[in-house]
Amino acid sequence: MIAFLVGTRPELIKIAPVVDALAARGAPLAIVHTGQHYSYQLDAIFFEELGLPKPAANLEVGSAPPAQQLGTIIIRAAEALAKLQPRWVLVQGDTNSVLGGALASLKLGLPVAHLEAGLRSDDWEMPEEANRVLAGRLAAMHLCPTEVQVERLRLEGIVRGVYLVGNTVVDAALKSAARARERSTVVERLGLSGKPYALVTLHRPSNVDSEERLRAVMRALLAVGERHGLALVFPAHPRTQATIARMADAKRFSEAPFILTEPVGYLDFLRLLADARLTLTDSGGVQEEACTLHVPCVTLRANTERPETVTVGANLLCDSTSPGDLEAAVDTMLARPRDWQNPFGDGRAGERVADLLLDPKVRRIPSGAP
Ligand code: UD1
Ligand code: UDP
């Protein structure tokens, strides 16, 4: 049996193609959910929309300071995984759930498959960088989206168990974008039919935890919206909502051109993205989806662990909160042709991963072991 140890919104989206491919092969599987995300709009809605099976266990870890959250994940994941004794534990990405799940598995002697392996921002101020690097050291199977990660792992001395599979975000986005076009009415509900808009998401601590920084970013966004005549559709993550709620001048960010909403489900999000003039984001997954759906992206960060998006011309980094700098980045992206090559694969990554997980010849001990 294959266990999926997951905890947050993007993990659910990116395991779905692997779950589907295993199910199509008749392979037994179980989802162990840490409960790091638990609000309906960040969690249950994705089970419904992606048709994921109900978790075999929900560890109900919830929100807590990082070290406590990680510790609780390790303890509870170890209990759940010990009962399941899976052939592989698959973790996806770089969250606290990933590191906690990988550590629990290691201590139980269970092999770890790391989906989306080898991404690096080299920015250790972001909590995800340590999670990625450490999970990578523990894993036996490294499932890389592109050659960039294969090469990075090689430079770090990880060569065994490294596979180039593509990114399952492509499988998920292509499959669900068609359903989103048929089923989602979000553009109409928000009164955006025929109107130009940009899709905004922000949730990185470096952008949203400080009131001053978030206000400066939102002022720059406001300037872009006014200059380009764009509405700014902003489904705000709870982390971001909490900071906006503390601002004395919060009201100006919930009025036009902003359309501030709760986080939306996957189908609504893909519909909003597909119809947007561009997206302004600090999300990893959104950079990849924008690249996949040929929507220009400006990433509101100083670095990205998805450099392929910049190389192919789909994405520009802008860490400046000066309205002029952000407007220049937006001008550049709006002027570019949208005909870049998608570096993240052909939409069959889930099938490749399923085949590797079921292959008896694949080594199941950490890559560093002799
Ligand atoms: C986490 C991941 C991040 C990932 C993101 C996906 C870590 C260190 N961070 O960040 O890598 O990009 O998920 O969205 O693992 N909250 C709710 N409802 C929920 C979950 C959280 O209201 O269902 C609120 C709580 O106030 C919580 C805050 O959001 O304190 C932050 O949640 P947390 O899971 O700690 O981190 P994210 O910012 O979601
Ligand atoms: N997403 C969504 N609704 C939203 C915002 C994002 O469904 O309101 C999806 C989006 O399609 C992408 C994923 O959530 O696949 C990205 O998650 P997030 O930005 O929270 O995390 P990251 O990718 O940065 O780890």
Image (spheres, grey):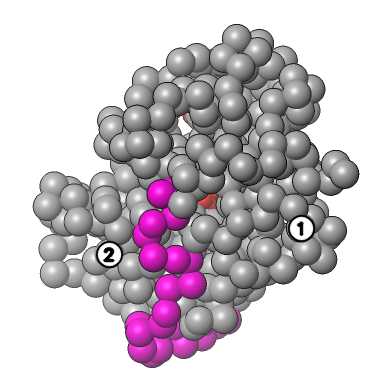
Q: Residue 349's spot in the image, x, y percent?
A: 44, 55
Instruction: Please give the range of residues in magenta.
Output: 324-351
Of 264 and 117, which appears nearest the observer? Answer: 117
Task: Identify whether 243 is placed above or below 232.
Answer: above
**Considering only vertical position in the picture, is 224 above or below 30?**
below
**At which x and y percent is residue 239?**
55, 39
**Residue drawn at the location 62% of the way across and 69% of the way down:** 147
Name the foreground residue: 191 vs 294: 294
Residue farthest toward the front in the current orientation of the protein? 361
For residue 5, what is the image quadrant? top right
Number of the label disc, if any, that sits on residue 274: 2
Location of mark 1 (residue): 159
Mark 1 vs mark 2: in front: 1
Q: Residues within 10 Å of mark 1 (few under 14, many from 20)?
A: some
Amino acid at dot 2: Ala
Relative side of 321 to 263, left or right: right
- Please report the residue visible at 58 percent of the width from the left and 22 percent of the height from the top: 86
- Cβ at disc 1 under 8 Å from ligand 2: no
Residue 38, image x and y in percent? Answer: 47, 25
